[in-house]
Amino acid sequence: MREYQVRAHSNGPARASVAWLNFFAPRMGEYTVPNSPGFQALNMTSPVVANNLPKRVHLEAGKAYFFCVCGRSATQPFCDGSHKDTDLKPLRFTVEESGDFWLCCCKHTENRPFCDGHHNQFTPADVGQERAL
C-alpha cells in the first residue's frame, strides 16, 4: 500500500485532493500522509456545517442562484467554487416569487436550499466541521 507525504506551509494547511494524490504522487515516489490536523484530504462527501443558523436572503423571481452544498463557501449560503476539490456540487435553483427566504447554512436540510430546522441538532462547536448527512 502506498503512502503519500503532503507538507503544510506557513501560509496555511496542506491540501491535496484524492485525484491529485492518485495521479501525481505515484510518479514522484513513496510518500507518507501524516494523520495530523495540518493535512486535509478533500475527497469529502459530507458537507461542512457552515453555520448552525439559517440565513435570511432576498431572492428575485426567475433569477438563477447556486446554493452551496459543501459548506466551504465564503459567500454562504451561495456557492463561490470552494467545492471544486470535493464530490459535492452546488444546487442551481430559482424562486417563483421575489421575497425573503430562509436558506439552510447547516447543509443538512431535506428541503434544499430552504431551511427545515435541521440546524437545531448542531451547536456552535459543530460549525466548520464536516458532518455526515
Image (spheres, rainbow, N blue to C red):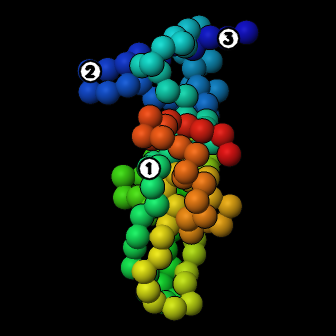
> Residue most toward the front?
120
Q: Amino acid at mark 1?
A: Asn
Q: Which sits earlier in the primary sequence, circle 3 or circle 2?
A: 3
44 w.r.t. 76: above or below: above
| Quadrant for the N terminus in the image | top right
Query: In the picture, residue 26 is in which quadrant?
Result: top right
Q: Which sits earlier in the primary sequence, circle 2 or circle 1?
A: 2
Label 1 SS: loop
x then y, percent, for residue 18: 61, 31
List the residue tagged with mark 3. 2
List the residue tagged with mark 2. 10
Q: Which sits earlier in the primary sequence, circle 1 or circle 3?
A: 3
* Residue at horizontal 26 percent and vertical 21 percent from the top: 10
x then y, percent, for residue 53: 45, 55
Asked if the residue at tag 1 contacts the one at tag 2, i.e. Cβ–Cβ closer than 8 Å, the answer is no
> Residue most toward the left?
10
x then y, percent, for residue 93: 57, 75
* Residue at horizontal 41 percent and vertical 24 percent from the top: 14
Question: Looking at the rendered structure, which numbered label has been put on residue 51?
Answer: 1
* Residue at horizontal 55 percent and vertical 84 percent from the top: 95
- Gap in angstroms between the C-alphas marked 3 and 2: 26 Å
Query: In the picture, residue 111 is in which quadrant?
Result: bottom right
Label 3 SS: loop
60 horizontally vs 111: left or right = left
Label 2 SS: loop
Q: Amino acid at mark 3?
A: Arg
Q: Amino acid at mark 2?
A: Ser
- Gap in angstroms between the C-alphas marked 2 and 1: 27 Å
Q: Of discs 3 and 2, which sits in the foreground?
A: 2
Q: Of discs 2 and 1, which sits in the foreground?
A: 1
* Residue at horizontal 49 percent and vertical 67 percent from the top: 103
Of 23 and 131, which appears nearest the observer?
Answer: 131
